[in-house]
């Protein structure tokens, strides 16, 4: 550890001890979060509507406050954007994180209050460093620069006083100026709106800096790193930034990209730390680099609830608090936050891998899965199967998506996978076979439906030409920021659009 990092590290020990207490006091911590939320919002329009002042227990909260979706809260949020105060939270809210969650056309505007900005998002960033230094006492984190790849922001069209943008841009815009001493590029560059110009400007301004940490979404960071290599004429990133030691990543699963990053950064001292920082809040950090599970962050002002996936979307699902979850079960996550989201169904699904402390993996989205034939294929199954097939064949995947293909003449179907390879496998047929076998090992429902091809045929792989996913995102106006490629879709709309860009159309869309 260098002198500066050694000087700063003791300031993180208090947080390290607080985080360690998650294992002993989950009920107490989460109960405190709920009480604080109810107290803070008791005089808001929402708090008066549901009489927050008289809520005495979690059971009262469940009985009184219904589950919410974004559409349920949208009328309230629209009024907040137009300057009304004390609606969902006790203030006028000036900043909103624009999020579509994926690449669909519908945007959501998530309130970013001062409380959630400082007590959740920034607190999560500090804890990432605290846990990283705890795991890596030899780090030189503060002696070099950190490169943060974010989105852009612009005034909201609904109100001249309200601003909106990708969450990363909102965070950068409000960042403590002291952080800029250890961060690149300049704010003027990182907040540029035109994505391709921004990538070039970042590469031009950072290639000659001594950078040792990266933060961003893996897919878009990859675009930037390739631009840096192209500018410098180098073949790997360690030739450009020899002190590189950590990539804090989130937004999408890292598994399909892991081997690609290892090839770009061939260093035994490189670390990868996954985070779960959504527009709605900061929820998880990989606290142990040997364990893929994310530690659920319990004291960021968020109160967590969960619904088993079998009941998600039903009229009266059973909702449970954090202390009642079990390992190995797919849950839809419900949150109440100091951003004014109350019993909000965020749309993400998680599966707990351990309890006390509670660790989880993000298994997908409530709307992103394939269950056309009863196979209940989740995103984490797909990501892990692709990662295994890559290692078995030496392939490297850049992007992929999959959707059902209905063989109406045979009353059967299959999954159609559209994959853009950086390094293709020697045999696409063998890759498809291994992908199929891996899915069978990872998902018993898929295995049952594939038994003797009774209801589900072997998967079909269509190889994308280079850049098709990028072209499709550009057509949608979704380049950069936190926009993601949905890995699994139960409908064919997206995959058929991609096939059209690729110059192919499935027989079902002709």
Image: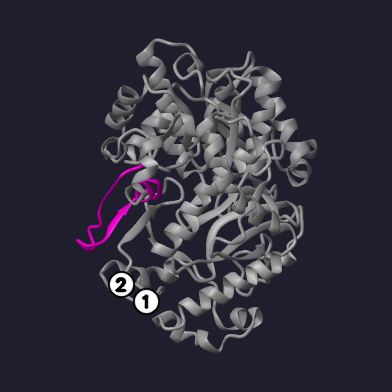
Question: Which mark, by number, is residue 497?
Answer: none
Q: Of callouts 1 and 2, which one flags the residue occurring earlier in the amino acid sequence? A: 2
Q: Secondary structure at mark 2?
A: helix
Query: Percent from the top left, x then y, of residue 467?
Result: 41, 25
Q: Which residue is mark 1?
A: 87
**Is residue 113 among what the camera can see?**
no
Residue visible at 50% across and 66% down? Answer: 337
Query: Percent from the top left, x then y, of residue 30?
Result: 64, 68
The quadrant of the picture occupied by the C terminus is top left
Is residue 153 in the magenta section? yes
Query: Percent from the top left, x then y, of residue 79?
Result: 30, 72
Task: Give the colour scheme of this rendering.
Answer: one colour
Magenta span of residues: 151-172
Query: Percent from the top left, x then y, of residue 437?
Result: 75, 31
Residue visible at 36% across and 68% down? Answer: 77
Q: CA distance from mark 1 to mark 2?
A: 8 Å
Residue visible at 38% across and 15% down? Answer: 230
Q: Is residue 280 above or below residue 82?
A: above
Is residue 27 in the magenta section? no
Question: Mark 1 and 2 residues: CB-CB less than 8 Å, in contact?
Answer: yes
State left or right for residue 437 relative to residue 237. Answer: right
Q: Is residue 461 above or below residue 118?
A: above
Q: Which residue is mark 2?
A: 79
The quadrant of the picture occupied by the N terminus is top right
Rendering quarter of residue 502: top left
């Amino acid at each position: 550890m260098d002198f500066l990092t050694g000087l700063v590290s003791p300031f993180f020990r208090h947080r390290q001890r607080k985080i360690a207490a998650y294992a002993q006091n989950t009920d107490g911590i989460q109960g405190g979060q709920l009480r604080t939320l109810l107290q803070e919002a008791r005089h808001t329009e929402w708090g008066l509507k549901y009489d927050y002042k008289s809520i005495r227990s979690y059971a009262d909260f469940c009985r009184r406050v219904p589950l919410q979706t974004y559409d349920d809260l949208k009328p309230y949020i629209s009024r907040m954007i137009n300057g009304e105060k004390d609606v969902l939270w006790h203030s006028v809210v000036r900043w909103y994180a624009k999020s579509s969650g994926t690449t669909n056309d519908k945007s959501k505007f998530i309130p970013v209050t001062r409380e959630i900005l400082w007590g959740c998002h920034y607190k999560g960033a500090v804890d990432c460093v605290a846990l990283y230094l705890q795991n890596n006492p030899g780090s030189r984190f503060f002696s070099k620069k950190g490169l943060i790849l974010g989105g852009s922001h612009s005034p909201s069209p609904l109100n001249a006083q309200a601003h909106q943008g990708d969450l990363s841009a909102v965070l950068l815009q409000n960042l403590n100026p002291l952080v800029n001493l250890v961060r690149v590029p300049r704010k003027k560059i990182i907040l540029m709106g035109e994505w391709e110009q921004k990538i070039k400007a970042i590469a031009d301004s950072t290639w000659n800096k001594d950078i040792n940490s990266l933060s961003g979404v893996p897919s878009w960071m990859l675009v930037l790193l390739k631009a840096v290599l192209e500018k410098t004429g180098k073949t790997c990133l360690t030739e450009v930034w020899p002190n590189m030691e950590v990539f804090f990543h989130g937004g999408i699963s890292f598994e399909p990209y892991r081997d690609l990053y290892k090839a770009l950064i061939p260093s035994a001292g490189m670390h990868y730390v996954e985070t779960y920082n959504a527009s709605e809040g900061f929820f998880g950090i990989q606290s142990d680099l040997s364990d893929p599970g994310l530690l659920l962050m319990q004291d960021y002002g968020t109160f967590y609830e969960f619904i088993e996936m079998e009941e998600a979307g039903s009229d009266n699902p059973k909702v449970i608090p954090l202390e009642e979850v079990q390992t190995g079960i797919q849950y839809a996550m419900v949150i109440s936050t100091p951003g004014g989201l109350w019993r909000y169904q965020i749309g993400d699904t998680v599966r707990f891998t351990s309890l006390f402390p509670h660790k989880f993996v993000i298994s997908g989205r409530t709307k992103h899965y394939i269950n056309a034939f009863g196979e209940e294929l989740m995103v984490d199954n797909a990501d892990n199967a692709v990662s295994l097939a890559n290692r078995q064949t030496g392939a490297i995947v850049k992007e992929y998506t999959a959707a059902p293909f209905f063989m109406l003449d045979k009353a059967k179907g299959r999954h159609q996978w559209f994959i853009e390879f950086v390094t293709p496998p020697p045999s696409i047929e063998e890759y498809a076979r291994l992908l199929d076998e891996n899915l069978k090992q990872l998902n018993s429902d898929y295995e049952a439906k594939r038994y003797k091809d009774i209801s589900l045929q072997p998967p079909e792989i269509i190889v994308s030409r280079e850049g098709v996913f990028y072209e499709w995102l550009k057509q949608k106006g979704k380049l950069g920021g936190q926009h993601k490629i949905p890995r699994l879709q139960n409908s064919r709309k997206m995959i058929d659009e991609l096939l059209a860009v690729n110059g192919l159309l499935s027989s079902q869309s002709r």
